[in-house]
Image (spheres, rainbow, N blue to C red):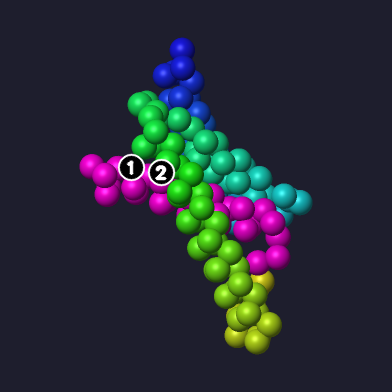
Amino acid sequence: MMKTFSKFSKFLGLFLILIGIPILLTSKSHNPELPLLSGLFVLFISNQTREDERSGAIRSSAALFALIIGYTIKLVISNLYQHQMIGFDLISINYFLILVFSLANIIRFSRLYIFMA
């Protein structure tokens, strides 16, 4: 039962990400980023088939590194916007969370499957 739910949550997260990207880019609705944000969050909290201390530590350290990198990117973008070098600013919390969860998923899964393989 738990294995099935674990696989379902991964597929649900990937499905929401895949439909969330086109919705974010094409929709004129009030919150087009919510499917993408939800998918990134569900994918990040989904369990591995073999959940142990190592995978939990990788997940928490990925979240920490993603928060540090994401906030650094936010500060750089805000500084460039203030100096009128770019035409956009990262002011919405949802877009900041998309950045952080994207980085956290990339860091987590690259450490799990690429660097630790």
Q: Position of residue 108 (x, y in %)?
A: 41, 46
**For residue 113, what is the image quadrant?**
top left
> How many numbered discs sit on the rendered protein?
2
Residue at image location 45% in from the left, 30% down from the top: 47
> Secondary structure beneath disc 2?
helix
Whether residue 27 can be seen here: no
Q: Position of residue 39 (x, y in %)?
A: 55, 40
Residue at image location 49% in from the left, 32% down from the top: 46
Question: Which is in the foreground here, disc 1 or disc 2?
Answer: 2
Residue at image location 58% in from the left, 53% down from the top: 98
**Does 71 sit above or below residue 11?**
below
**Does 37 sit above or below residue 50?**
below
Amino acid type, residue under disc 2 in the picture? Ile
Work out whether residue 38 or residue 58 is closer to the camera in this orientation and state it: 58
**For residue 49, what is the image quadrant?**
top left
Q: Position of residue 18 (x, y in %)?
A: 50, 43
Q: Give the labeled residue for mark 2.
A: 58
What secondary structure prevails in the magenta region?
A: helix
Would you call the spot at circle 2 few (<14 residues within 10 Å), some (14-19), or many (20 or more)? some
> Secondary structure beneath disc 1?
helix
**For residue 28, what is the image quadrant?**
bottom right
As for residue 37 lying within the magenta part, the answer is no
Amino acid type, residue under disc 1 in the picture? Leu
**Does 59 sit above or below residue 81?**
above
Q: Are marks 1 and 2 in contact (CB under 8 Å)?
A: yes
Work out whether residue 102 or residue 65 is closer to the camera in this orientation and state it: 65
Look at the image and give the residue range highlighted in magenta.
90-117
CA–CA distance between discs 1 and 2? 8 Å
Q: Give the labeled residue for mark 1.
A: 112
Q: Residue furthest top?
A: 1
Q: Position of residue 105 (x, y in %)?
A: 46, 47
